[in-house]
């Protein structure tokens, strides 16, 4: 298995929070300690890691200007342990998930007055001694952090929904704890209904396009993460209120699908409702959320939006350099400008999970291969050309920073940022859990070395400005994978070199990921069709042929 929880385990810590009005959790009197995770982990000169919080620390109190622990990371760490427990049956992961969910629920504000503005919302920051910090420095939005809809409210819904499903249905579950999680999830749902859904059905004009006004924090990205939890909960609870909420939120996320297979952003579900021209990789789980909505509620529009992002936009992204922090273009353009080329674990994992979720619910196997290509980011297919995840320690580095200069003038344009905080490690592990569940994608993910000379011959894709190509190889096994993505409006023919003995597999796919051709041929010079707006994958794996 690729998944190794050791580094995340090292970031977990138990705290006994002091009494604070409006904050309690499951069996707090009987179990006064809860679990949380440190926000950051700084690499020391000797190669070890020091857990730290956000902002400078007061030398007298030990309090950080932000906090030591935060709801975003606690929620997502709980999802890691929940998924690991359900995949492996490991009791220690079950226990970790339970304790982290208890810690997360302590951050949720619960008042006697249900009309209180903070009721059901979540405080973001917590200090090393368990004291909550409702207003960090610099200030978050909203401020105080439990005064309105937020990213951490959405991620709390994600964790509580998956937590309820696990503790209710698993044979190692706990019905009493599941009932508690359900109450807290419904409290969070009521906060979303109170703060977000009054805007349901309202549209803004953004860059001359109608844009939904009823997304959490104006984000399809944040709302997509909430959908993951709502789908997990709805799928096993029969809660009509939850189903209505997920359907309304999904309608807004679906409306952020933009572009065509030939024009920017090539079918992507754009992350922010305040822009129809910008896309960022981090928090990119909206397509995964939509795939789950289709699975749970049968929403065909959600399915089609997930497929457009997975089968049209993502192949384009993969041949154009990977999950950059920010790309911008005028809608309808053929090219996008990379404004911020930094790449993070969060962005790479979002591609992997969205592809595999969409592949599973639509039965389109080429998306699994694409997920492997996206997952190869963790093993070296990135601007630094270096592994970002270490299976021996479970550590995921904080990202690939971009050095000064033009990416086309420099060789490897990135350098590894070797801190390894909670968010990076969490999303690395979520990617590994997804790959462990799909052996084909996992095998493809280990093919990481870019081959710049492939397809350089006359008649290759390099002769066609409307067909982009990326080839990866494994020098140890000579496994290879080539991805061709077309933005042409007619079918193209490309010659691809696939050196070595044995057989190669060719899959030809339309812009929705529907397989048009699948065949095996002899390795060597391969002539392949690339459909209009579609993609073709050619693989040669060890043992084939």
Image (cartoon, helix red, strand yellow):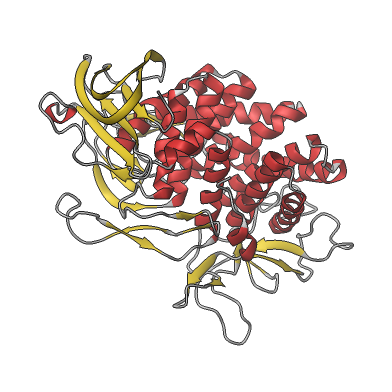
Q: Residue furthest bottom?
A: 60
Q: Residue furthest left?
A: 458
Q: Residue furthest top?
A: 516
Looking at the picture, does residue 468 appear above or below residue 63? Answer: above
Residue at 65 percent across and 54 percent down: it is: 122
Quadrant containing the N terminus in the rendered view: top right
Quadrant containing the C terminus in the rendered view: top left
The front one of 538 and 512 is 538
The front one of 433 and 117 is 433
* Residue 482: image location, x then y, percent: 30, 31
* Residue 53: image location, x then y, percent: 55, 70
The front one of 74 and 126 is 74
* Residue 2: image location, x then y, percent: 55, 47
Question: In the drawing, does residue 228 fall left or right of residue 379?
Answer: right
Question: In the drawing, does residue 85 fall left or right of residue 421?
Answer: right
Q: Residue furthest right?
A: 30
* Residue 52 placement: quadrant: bottom right
Instruction: Give the tally of numbered discs.
Output: 0
Looking at the picture, does residue 84 appear above or below residue 29? Answer: above
* Residue 156: image location, x then y, percent: 64, 48
Question: In the drawing, does residue 108 fall left or right of residue 527?
Answer: right
* Residue 539 placement: quadrant: top left
């Amino acid at each position: 298995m690729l998944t190794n929880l050791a580094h995340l385990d090292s970031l977990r810590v138990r705290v006994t929070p002091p009494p604070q009005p409006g904050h309690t959790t499951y069996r707090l009197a009987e179990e006064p300690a809860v679990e949380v995770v440190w926000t950051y982990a700084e690499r020391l000169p000797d190669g070890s890691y020091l857990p730290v919080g956000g902002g400078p620390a007061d030398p007298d109190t030990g309090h950080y200007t932000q906090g030591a622990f935060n709801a975003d990371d606690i929620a997502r760490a709980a999802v890691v342990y929940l998924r690991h427990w359900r995949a492996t049956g490991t009791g220690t992961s079950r226990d970790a998930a339970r304790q982290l969910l208890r810690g997360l629920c302590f951050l949720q504000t619960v008042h006697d007055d249900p009309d209180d503005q903070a009721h059901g919302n979540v405080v973001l920051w917590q200090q090393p001694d368990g004291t909550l910090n409702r207003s960090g420095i610099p200030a978050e939005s909203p401020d105080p952090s439990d005064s309105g809809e937020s990213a951490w409210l959405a991620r709390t819904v994600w964790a509580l929904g998956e937590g309820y499903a696990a503790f209710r249905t698993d044979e190692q579950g706990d019905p009493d704890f599941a009932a508690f999680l359900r109450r807290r999830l419904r409290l969070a749902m009521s906060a979303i209904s109170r703060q977000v859904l009054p805007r349901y059905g309202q549209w803004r004009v953004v860059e001359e396009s109608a844009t939904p006004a009823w997304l959490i924090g104006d984000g399809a990205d944040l709302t997509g993460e909430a959908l993951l939890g709502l789908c997990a909960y709805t799928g096993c609870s029969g809660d009509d209120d939850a189903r209505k909420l997920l359907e309304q939120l999904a309608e807004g996320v679906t409306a952020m699908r933009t572009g065509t297979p030939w024009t920017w952003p090539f079918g992507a579900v754009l992350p922010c409702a305040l822009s129809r021209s910008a896309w960022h990789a981090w928090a990119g789980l909206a397509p995964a959320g939509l795939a789950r909505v289709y699975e749970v509620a049968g929403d065909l529009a959600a399915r089609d939006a997930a497929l457009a992002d997975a089968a049209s936009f993502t192949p384009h992204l993969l041949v154009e350099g990977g999950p950059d922090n920010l790309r911008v273009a005028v809608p309808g353009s053929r090219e996008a400008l990379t404004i911020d080329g930094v790449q993070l674990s969060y962005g790479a994992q979002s591609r992997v999970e969205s592809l595999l979720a969409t592949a599973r619910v639509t039965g389109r196997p080429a998306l699994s291969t694409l997920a492997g290509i996206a997952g190869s980011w963790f093993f070296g297919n990135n601007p630094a050309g270096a592994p970002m995840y270490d299976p021996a320690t479970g550590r995921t580095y904080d990202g690939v920073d971009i050095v000064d200069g033009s990416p086309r003038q420099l060789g490897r344009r990135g350098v590894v940022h070797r801190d390894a905080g909670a968010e990076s490690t969490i999303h690395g592990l979520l990617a590994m859990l997804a790959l462990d569940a799909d052996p084909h994608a996992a095998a493809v993910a280990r093919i990481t070395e870019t081959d710049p000379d492939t397809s350089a011959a006359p008649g290759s894709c390099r002769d066609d400005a409307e067909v982009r190509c990326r080839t990866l190889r494994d020098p140890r096994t000579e496994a290879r994978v080539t991805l061709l993505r077309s933005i042409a409006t007619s079918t193209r023919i490309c010659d691809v070199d696939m050196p070595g003995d044995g057989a190669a597999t060719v899959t030809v796919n339309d812009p929705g990921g529907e397989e048009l051709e699948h065949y095996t041929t002899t390795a060597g010079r391969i002539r392949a069709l690339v459909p209009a707006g579609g993609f073709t994958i050619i693989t040669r794996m060890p043992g084939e042929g």
